[in-house]
Each structure stands twice: as structure tokens, then as C-alpha cells.
Image (cartoon, rainbow, N blue to C red):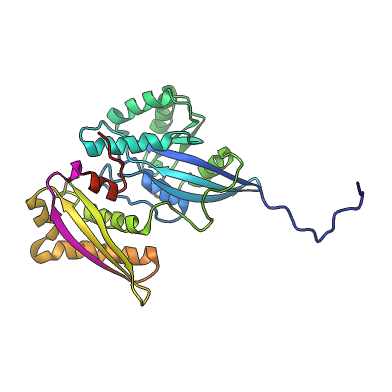
Amino acid sequence: MSDTPASPHAPASPAPTRCGVVAVLGAPNAGKSTLVNTLVGQKVAITSPKAQTTRARMLGLALHHVDGAAVQMILVDTPGIFAPRRRLDRAMVNAAWEGAEAADAVLLLVDAIKQRRHELEPLLETLATRPERKILVLNKVDRAKKEPLLALAQELSAKAEFAEVFFISALTGEGVAEMKDVLARMMPEGPWMYPEDQVSDVSERLLAAEITREQLYRQLHEELPYDSAVRPERYQLRSDGSIEIHQQIVVARENQRAIVLGKGGARIKAIGEAARKELSEVLGTKVHLFLHVKVLENWAEDREVFEEIGLDWVR
């Protein structure tokens, strides 16, 4: 064995890598999608003031460097957990719990203002019996008073064993950097599961449909209930580099079709313009978006629609 020192020109050993799964759970409208977008550093999940906006389980991919290691965190943005009544509800809740299975960390995100106790309590009971490492995250602290926040954290910590408690604002980013450091340290050593430049597991085709659905909810927040979906129909690259996208907005009743269309087609035009503008920014190229509305009374019982919007069919 030689005692000759290593050459100063020898290649440096690559930085160690870590990779793990973080499931983001919570009651509807706690801010899960906003937090995932903030951690990733760009939009990968749609947000809306409307509860239960997220339907399918989606992955956001966040990169971070901590303690000399390059870390890839696979963030599972889950639908809000609530008492399911319809097949669509059951599929959404199933997607949420499946997202938590075998996660290296489970974040319970709580809206510190609204709290939504009727949905939070059963969630805490279930989490208390699960083996995954649990982290309590109180969100929207930019709008909450400190003393009630500390009392809430103590009360919830007594109901399940949390390894860490964080106070953050997913919207402003307050407290998120510190939380990201701790999460990165929790991830096990191992190779990355996705390429460095990938930010989500969602296809551009499905993300495009989600962005249109986001506009549908934002512009018709009061008028349109959950009886709507956006089905991707065609996604085609044109010879000039632009993208042509055709989508079908599905509603359950004829009067809802009239609401989506608006007077003289004004509302669907506004929805299309807003979605097209955002899609152009997200995809980095000009987008031609074509929307039409279809009435399908029992779409929430249609297996084909479920699969098209990224949900598993449940009985």
C-alpha cells in the first residue's frame, strides 16, 4: 500500500445525495398546494379559495442542499381529508391516505385561523396510530396572534406524537426555509428518483387541464359547485413551436353550462384567456387553447372521467 499523498488534481468525490418522500396532509383549504409550490419554488399544483381544490395525488420535487448533501424531496400534495359522501369524495380521500404511506415524513398542515376542527379531529386520531414520522405545521401565522397559536400547538401536540412543530406562512414564505432545512435532514441517504430539472410527476397535458380548472373555480367561485371537471382532449405541438390544447369542461346540469358560457360566451372566453396566459408562462411558449362545455349528469360516477383527471376508480 503506497504512502504517496493523493494528487491535488484528483477529482473530488461527488457530494452525497439524499432522497425521500414528504406527504402533506390536512383538512380542505389548509394551504397544502400553496406550501408545495413554495417548497418547489414554482407552480406545480393549483390553488383556489374553494376547499377541496386538489383532487388527485400529485408530486412536487424540491431540491435543497444541507450539511454538504444534495437532497431531493418528493412532496406529495394530497387532497384535503374530509368525510366522504360521494364516489368522487372517496377517491379523493383514498388518494390522500395513499400519499402518506411509507413517507419519510408526514406534515399535518393546519389553518391556524379557521382550524376546521370537525375535519381535523378525526385526522389527528388516525395520524396518532400511524408509524410515519409526523410534523405539525401551523399555517397562515402572518394573520394569527402569537398566544393562541402557541396554545393551539400545545393542544394538538397532545393528541399525536409530533417530532417537530413549525409556524409558517405558505403564502409569504415566513418560516418555510427553516422547515425545509429540517425536512432535508430527515431524508434518508440514497440516489435521487427524478432528474434534477423535473419539478413534478404531472404530465403537461394534465397540468394544463388543472390550470383551466383553477380558473373555472376562481371566476365562478360562488356560482359553480363541485359538479365540474376539465377533461384533456388534445395536446399537440405545432410546427412553429407553439402548443395547441383542446379541453372539455364537464358540468352536471344544463343551467351550469349556461353559467360557464356566460352571456354571449363572455365567461368561457375570460376563463380561456386567463388559463392561456398562465399556460404560456408555465410552458414557456405560445399556447392556443380551445374550450367547450359538455353536460354529463353522472360524470362523478364515470370511470373514464376519473382516470382522465388523475383519480383511481373506487367502489
Magenta stretch encompasses residue 300 = yes
Residue furthest to the bottom: 240
Kindly tell me whether residue 295 is visible in this rendering.
yes
| The C terminus: image quadrant | top left
Residue at point 53%, 55% (across, down): 195
Residue at point 92%, 49% (across, down): 3
**From the viewer's perspective, is 276 left or right of 161?**
left
Q: How many numbered marks appear?
A: 0
Q: Residue 290 location, x and y as percent?
A: 22, 66
Out of 307 and 273, give the one closest to the viewer.
307
Q: Is residue 206 above or below residue 307?
A: below
Residue at point 43%, 29% (across, down): 153
Q: Residue 164 location, x and y as percent?
A: 51, 32
Kindly tell me whether residue 114 is visible in this rendering.
no
The part of the image, by quadrant, that contains residue 291 is bottom left
Q: Residue 139 location, x and y as percent?
A: 39, 40
**From the viewer's perspective, is 195 left or right of 260?**
right
Q: Is residue 189 above or below residue 203?
A: above
Residue furthest to the front: 304
**From the viewer's perspective, is 22 left or right of 306?**
right
Out of 312 and 102, give the one closest to the viewer.
312
**From the viewer's perspective, is 234 left or right of 31?**
left
Out of 119 and 298, give the one closest to the viewer.
298
Residue numbers of the magenta segment:
289-302
Out of 93 and 28, give the one closest to the viewer.
93
Q: Residue 84 location, x and y as percent?
A: 24, 32
Magenta stretch encompasses residue 15 = no
